[in-house]
Image: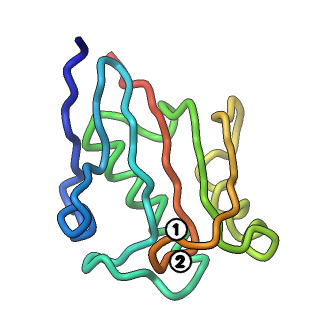
């Protein structure tokens, strides 16, 4: 059986404790990152949508770093959007800053009607470098 290890970034926000989940789980050489949202340090949503997306990527970056990974180690992305048609341009603008050159990770975008007060969430699977 593969051992599982919980991973948390150094600047972990209060949502992990409030809702009882890990930022990520290491299983073998894979890192399964929970949905990262654009939260402030106190766990509240950032009101400005573009800044919320940027904070979600910042939270993702910190979680990846805690496991010795970076954006280049991501192989699969799933994002959740409360208003995809209105939000997609902003998301793509921020995404392009992170994933500007190929090879791009796999990506699935899902429209949803609720994200606990947030408007964007990103979860990924990354391969942990040796």
Task: List x then y, in percent, for residue 121.
Answer: 52, 61
Mark 1–mark 2 Cα distance, whole angstroms, equals 5 Å
Name the residue rendered at 67%, 41% in the picture: 107
Question: What residue did someone put label 2 on?
Answer: 51
Image quadrant holding the N terminus, namely: top left
Which of the 4 image quadrants contains residue 101?
Answer: top right
- The outermost residue toward the bottom is 47
Task: Work out whether residue 78 or residue 129 is closer to the camera in this orientation and state it.
Answer: 78
Residues at badges 1 and 2 in contact (C-beta under 8 Å)? yes
- Residue 88 sits in which quadrant? bottom right
The answer to whether residue 45 is left or right of residue 79 is left
- Height in image: 35 above or below 86? above
Residue depicted at x 47% and y 64%: 56
Disc 1: CA contacts within 10 A as few (<14), some (14-19) or many (>=20): many
* Residue 52, placed above or below residue 102: below
Total marks drawn? 2
101 displayed left or right of 53: right
Q: Which mark is residue 54?
A: 1
Q: Is residue 93 above or below residue 64?
A: below
Image coords of residue 63 (percent x, y): 32, 49
């Amino acid at each position: 059986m593969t051992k599982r290890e919980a991973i948390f970034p150094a600047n972990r926000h209060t949502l992990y404790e409030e809702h009882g989940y890990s930022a990520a789980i290491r299983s073998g050489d894979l890192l399964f990152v929970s949905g990262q949202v654009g939260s402030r340090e106190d766990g509240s949503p950032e009101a400005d949508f573009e800044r919320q997306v940027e904070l979600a990527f910042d939270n993702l970056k910190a979680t990846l770093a805690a496991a010795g990974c970076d954006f280049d180690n991501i192989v699969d992305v799933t994002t959740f959007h409360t208003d995809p048609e209105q939000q997609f341009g902003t998301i793509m603008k921020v995404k392009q800053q992170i994933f500007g050159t190929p090879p791009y990770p796999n990506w699935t975008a899902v429209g949803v009607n609720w994200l606990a007060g947030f408007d964007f969430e990103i979860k990924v699977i990354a391969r942990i470098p040796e």
